[in-house]
Image (cartoon, grey):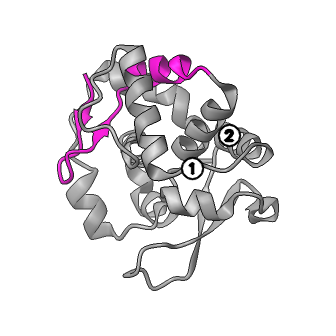
Amino acid sequence: MTIEHPASGTAIFKPEELRNLINSIPRNSDKDKFEALLYSGCRYTELQEVHGKQHRLQQSSLKVRNTKALVKAKNRYVKLNRQGERAINNFFRGSNLPSYVAWWQNLKRWCRNAGINPSGVGIKSTRKTWESYLVTIYPQLTERIFLSQGHTDLIALKHYLMIPFSKEDKEGMLYFVEGWNE
C-alpha cells in the first residue's frame, strides 16, 4: 500500500511497489523515462527541458534549470548515483516525456497493471518517492539532498522527514539509493 505524502496527498511508492511498477511498464522507452524521473528526482518540466542536452550531465550530476518561481538560483545540480546516470543516459537516447495528461494516464494504467491502487499517484510521485528514500537512508545528508532537489530546509522538514517507513521498506530502499552518498 502506497504511503501518502503528508502535505500534498501524493502517493509515495514503497520499494516493493516500485519494483512491481517498473516491471509492469511494457515499453523500455517508457521505463527509461520513468527511471529518469525517479533517479533524478527532477520536476517533470525540468526533465523535459534537459532532454537532448547531454552536455548537462557532468561528473555524476545533472545541471537543470529551476522551474519554481520562488527559487533564487537559476540552475542547480542534481546529484545522481550510478543507476541515475544510467537512467539519464537512456532517457537522452529516447524521445522526450509526453504531455502531463498522457504521462498521468500511463502511470495510472501501469499502477493498475502492477496491482497498486492508483489513488494519489501523479506526476510528482517519482520525485516525492525519491526524496523520501534519500532522506530516510541518508538523514545526515539532508542539506545536500534538499539542495540537489531544489528545496529549502523548511520545506523538507515539513514534508519529508516524518514519513513512516517500516524496517523492510528501509532495507528495500537501499537498492535504489545505493551510491548516492559517494
Measured as percent of width and height from the top left, residue 167 is found at 30, 22
Measured as percent of width and height from the top left, residue 174 is found at 49, 29
User: Are dots 1 and 2 in contact, CB under 8 Å?
Assistant: yes
Measured as percent of width and height from the top left, residue 19 is found at 49, 20
Residue 44 seen in this snapshot? yes
Q: Is residue 167 above or below residue 88?
A: above
Q: Amino acid at mark 2?
A: Ala
> Which range of residues does the magenta coloring cover?
1-26
* Viewer-proximal residue among 9 and 154: 9
Q: Is residue 23 magenta?
A: yes
Q: Residues within 10 Å of mark 2 (few under 14, many from 20)?
A: many
Judging by the rendered image, the residue that carries numbered circle 1 is: 40
Q: Amino acid at mark 1?
A: Ser
- Residue 6 relative to residue 69: left or right: left
* Viewer-proximal residue among 49 and 180: 49
Determine whether the residue tagged by mark 2 lies in a helix, strand or loop: helix
**Residue at x-position 52% and y-position 73%:** 66
Q: Residues within 10 Å of mark 1 (few under 14, many from 20)?
A: many
- Residue 55 relative to residue 110: left or right: right
Judging by the rendered image, the residue that carries numbered circle 2 is: 87
**Residue at x-position 46% and y-position 57%:** 145
Determine whether the residue tagged by mark 1 lies in a helix, strand or loop: helix
Quadrant position of residue 169:
top left
Measured as percent of width and height from the top left, residue 33 is found at 61, 40
**Residue at x-position 51% and y-position 52%:** 99
Quadrant placement of the N terminus = top left
- Residue 113 relative to residue 45: left or right: left
Return the disc, 1 or 2, that comes first in the chain's sequence. Answer: 1
**Residue at x-position 56% and y-position 63%:** 46
Question: Looking at the image, which residue sits at the far bottom?
Answer: 72
